[in-house]
Image (spheres, helix red, strand yellow):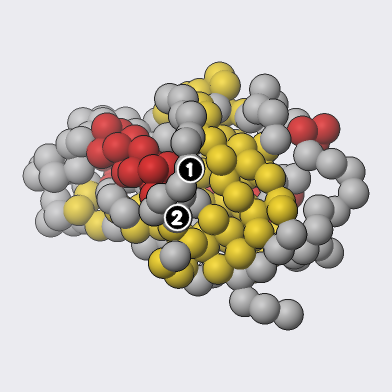
Amino acid sequence: MRTLLVAWVVTGMTLGARGGRQGLPERLRIHVAQGDPAALPATPPPPFSVIVVPAGLRGMMSAVWIQNNRHWDELAGQNTLTQLLGTGRPTQREYLGCLAGEVENDTLWVRELKSAADLKQLQFAVAGNCDQVDHLVGTWHTHPYRAGPDGRALKERGLSALDLETFAAARDLITLVMWDMDSIDVAAKAPDGSVRHPVPLAMR
């Protein structure tokens, strides 16, 4: 079976768009990314070995990351405990979005980004749903920076264990996290429902 690839397509598409983690106690981490089970077909989709996210959408994702993490470097005097307790400054917010697309031959195409409904953003948690999205193929979210003991920004590089657990229980075919501008981690479902992670990225 071929390795799954994520390809950033640079040209040739007209697209529409709408607009803590590692080491943190699980009880403090809320991540609701599941859509309506009826949003995806009951039968497994054709197996796909390539995931295509066009460059235009990748740029829009970067813009969302910047907007929601615009105070990432203002962590002096903060630490993870004060952030969790809500006594620190809310320098960033997690964001949850929906991915619409389709599977054609051996390729899953992400065609559109849409905002999750009932979006509730906290510093280290996000809630929402993609029930209203036609042709839903998955979700994506951002990771904020945590404040280390010295106030420096700490990154969670990739999908967390909780992210993957949530994805495994959902009907989504793929899930993405942007943990830094232009830095993306991806997981995908095989036809038997098993989770493949990490999915390697490839330019195209």
Query: Which x, y percent locates residue 113?
Result: 50, 35
Q: Say which residue label 2 marks.
A: 9
Q: Say which residue label 1 marks.
A: 13
Question: Residue at image x 39%, y 53%?
Answer: 10
Instruction: State whether residue 177 is above or below residue 98.
Output: below
Q: How far apart are marks 1 and 2 (CA)?
A: 8 Å
Query: Which x, y percent locates residue 19?
Result: 43, 25
Along the horizontal axis of the image, is 90 left or right of 198?
left
Of 192 and 161, the residue lying toward us: 192
Of 12 and 124, the residue lying toward us: 12
Q: Do the residues labelled 1 and 2 touch (CB within 8 Å)?
A: yes
View extreme (left): residue:
76
Q: What residue type is labelled 1?
A: Met
Q: Which amino acid does label 2 sit on?
A: Val
Label 1 Cα neighbours within 10 Å, binned few <14 / some 14-19 / many ≥20: few
| Residue 63: quadrant of the picture | top left
View extreme (right): residue:
43
